[in-house]
Amino acid sequence: MYKKIGMLGGKDSILPFKGLGIDVFPTSDLEEAKQQIKAMADDYGIIFITERVAEQLEDTIAQYDSKPTPAIIPIPSSTGSLGIGMDRIQQNVEKAIGMNILDD
């Protein structure tokens, strides 16, 4: 059984992804975003979340770090990148292979 791909964040940042077949969930407050992640956890294999929302929901996202799904991946919002997504990728690579191979 295939799992879905979803996206959570500010409306302006995520609506363009609807055209790619990704389920989008605009959120306007943090409690709503937290509940939406919990609701998506069983059916979604990948949840993209804007960095601006992700930085405020670190504890909620951390609950899923040790589970195979969903993979919660921070991406830049329409206002630009905070570097959170790349930092998270570097941490996961280092955890998986024991060293960071992504640094310049």
Image (cartoon, grey):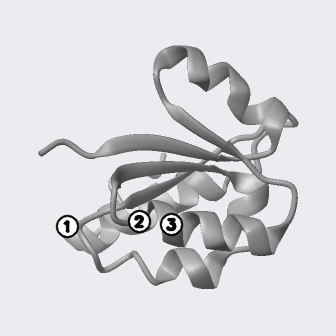
Q: Secondary structure at mark 2?
A: loop
Residue at 30% across / 80% down in the picture?
66
Mark 1–mark 2 Cα distance, whole angstroms, equals 26 Å
Q: Which residue is mark 2?
A: 41
33 or 99, nearer to the observer: 33
Which quadrant of the structure image shows residue 24?
top right
Three-letter amino acid code of the residue under disc 2: Ala
Q: Is residue 6 left or right of residue 7?
A: left
Contact between marks 3 and 2 (CB within 8 A): the answer is yes
For residue 32, above or below residue 63: above
Where residue 46 sits: x, y (%)? 39, 49
Residue 102 in sight from this viewpoint: no
101 or 19, nearer to the observer: 19
For residue 77, above or below residue 53: above
Where residue 50 sits: x, y (%)? 69, 49
Q: Which mark is residue 97?
A: 1
Residue 26 in sight from this viewpoint: yes
Where residue 40 sits: x, y (%)? 47, 60
Q: Which mark is residue 39?
A: 3
Three-letter amino acid code of the residue under disc 3: Ala
Q: Is residue 99 left or right of residue 77?
A: left
Three-letter amino acid code of the residue under disc 1: Ile
Where residue 79 sits: x, y (%)? 87, 36
Instruction: Estimate how packed mark 2 is, as few (under 14), some (14 to 19) or many (20 or more) residues with alpha carbons within 10 Å.
Output: some
Mark 3–mark 2 Cα distance, whole angstroms, equals 6 Å
Contact between marks 1 and 2 (CB within 8 A): the answer is no
